[in-house]
Image (tube, grey):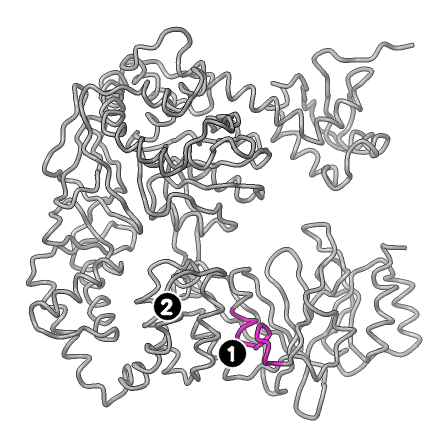
Amino acid sequence: MAEDIFGIEAPKLWERNLPLVPVDGKAPIPTGWTGLLGGTPSELKRVEWIEKYRIKNIGLLLGMGLTASEVLDALDIDDDRLERLVLHLLGLNRADRRALLSGKRGKKGATIFVRAPKALKSTVIRGSGGLGNIDFLAAGKMTVMPPSIHPETGRPYEVVGKPLLEVDFKQLPEISEHQITLLKVTLGSEHAITLILGESTHDAGVALVAVLVRAGATDEEIIDIFVGLLPEGYKGNSLDELPGWIASARAKGFGDASDEDSPSLAHALVSLALNAGIELFNDGDGTAFATLPHTGSAIVYRVKSDTFKYWLRYRAYAVMGKVATSNPLMEAVATLETKALFDGVEYPVFARVAGDGKNVIIDIGAADGRIVKVDNADWSVEAGSGLKFVRGAGFDALPIPEKGGSLAKLKDFLGLDEHNFRLLVAFLINALKPDGPYFILLVEGEQGSGKSVFCEIVKRIIDPNKAMRLRLPDKPQDLMIQAKEYRLPSFDNASGMKAEMSDVLCTLATGGGIAVRKLYSDGELHVMSYTRPFIINGISGYANRPDLMERAIPIRLTPMPEGGRKTEAELLTEFEGLLPGILGALYDSVAMALANFDTVEPPRHLRMADAAKWIKAAEPALKLEGDSLIDAIGKAQDDFVIEKVNEDPLVTMLRLVCRTGPFEGYVMQLFSAFKEHREAVPEHALPKTPPHLSNQLKRMRPAMAKAGVYVEFLGKDNKGRKVKVSLDGGYLPAF
């Protein structure tokens, strides 16, 4: 039987003298199991275990002796972004090394088997800046082996590389205490996450090289670490510059006792910055900011940003005639950051759009700090404001808006029907609301429908950036890092979405945050909290959870005719000519929203009532005939939810169970009734237990009601929770 995991796999491992234990989920079953490392059990014990634990998972005990000085250990990587780093450092991604990759993968990350000195003890290599950890597992630790079933995913663990049973243990990669030290130094550095993201890598790379040189890394090891950290397909020049950074770090010493210039130059850089008239302050959330003389008091920069460092380098050369190398520069920046946090005033900091209920202020990206100010009567371009705006990575400028424009030109340019045009305008107006909540723009369409260009044009109207098209992250902390940088993130070509990410996207739209471990700290948490409008596009099926759908403005694009297509460059050039007038008309709508917001009644039939109220308040400026923007959103949401719910396997199963009449009984009985129709729906697509079914029914109940499937919870007794499921018509006649 396929379920006999321990019964089938244990004898194979014993045949190679590998010590193991039966496991329930991830927990070893025998007490005192750590004492079983000394060897395989007796024949009698093997028979007893196989009979008793035949269907259980199987766990390998680590620390088994391979030679007189080496044992079998493992590196457990709990963050997918760190897997390449480990493989490169171990030499598993290099053709000139003969080590074999053998490991396994569960829900996330991977476990890699290694040869290690006996003296090495288990340790946790902690990641900073939102990175996960790597656990070095030695004697006294256990790891679950394929094909055991992962207790959370319900799927078997997968083999990575070559199965351990087929490997000559001598061919496994070696790991040393020195390499573990390098991993600790790398993951503990705040610069590792910058290299992983692949943006603004120069200063972070120089600083990390200095740290690795101090830790005794060889040139080859540093190169392996950088190749492993930088994203696959990285197009920057950091790898080309890396040999020069290494040579410079070794020549300079970077912190050696003989390096007497660094402290004095660092002190001079601090004095230079302060004497230039910058303002240091913080946002009250642990981030230090500074103004720069040439952009005025409204535009601010993170003290640790590349822009601030480049400015300080320029001042050092222009004023002192000195080149500010990385070590004194980093020391000066750290000192200025500390002054901003402890001596500076606290101000709120905004990205692109701000407001106070009476005005909306928009940072258009002008070099001199000019902004657009919108009040309840009109808008104007002004020299600045008393608010603070930060310009994140890749920030681009908007053109100066023009009076007398029309949003109808956007409709004609994009070739939208009236319904989709109203949905787009509603999203644009909502995106300029100073604070959340915000609707999510979900754009679907077949290949060739122009989804990516459509979304880029929307982003150019609100928040142009060099990173116009982002990949939807897999991890919540990566999403929040992007939200920190961009007012309007636009995620291109989404193909799927985990439940966790769907929930975090809802949090981003309505307000909230996530807590991650703070840099260089084991216990202290740092909360990342942002509220942003955002865009996601894909072919279909990437958004299927009701919470996300009810926060969405869905737009479905149709394929463009083959013969009349313009190139992307032609479209964007034409659009740039229309954009100033479009912005002027959009800002007219924002002025109307400010004028009407306090008196308009919120549309209470939509979940995002606060966001909808702002849109409703702006609508008179558009002079539309027929259905309102709110009507368009409500219809689009209902159609979208009904379509997605009708595609859900649970709804299909409920309709089959209720085909001749309503179901009324315990959730356990409903779960059992599914078995009669299991051929109609893949089993993996349905809830795996009655409690899972109960939770999914609660979560989907409002959405299912729109599709004519009604769920009513009738109470709970000592046998469980009762539920009634009925359909809006559709029953088969009784015979």
User: What predominant SS class does the magenta segment belong to?
Assistant: loop
The CA distance from mark 1 to mark 2 is 24 Å
Q: Where is residue 46 in the image (x, y as percent from the top left)?
A: 89, 72
Q: Which residue is drawn at 29% across and 85% down?
A: 253
Residue under label 1: 180
The quarter holding residue 413 reads top left
Q: In this view, does 488 lie above or below 636?
A: below
Mark 1 closeness class: few <14, some 14–19, many ≥20 residues within 10 Å: some
The question of residue 91 being in magenta is answered with yes
Q: Give the range drawn in magenta.
A: 85-97
Point 62% across, 25% down: residue: 701
Q: Position of residue 663 (x, y in %)?
A: 78, 20
Q: Is mark 1 on a helix, strand or loop?
A: helix
Residue 625 vs 598, above or below: the answer is: above
In which image quadrant can residue 601 be found? top left
Q: In which quarter of the image is residue 694?
A: top right
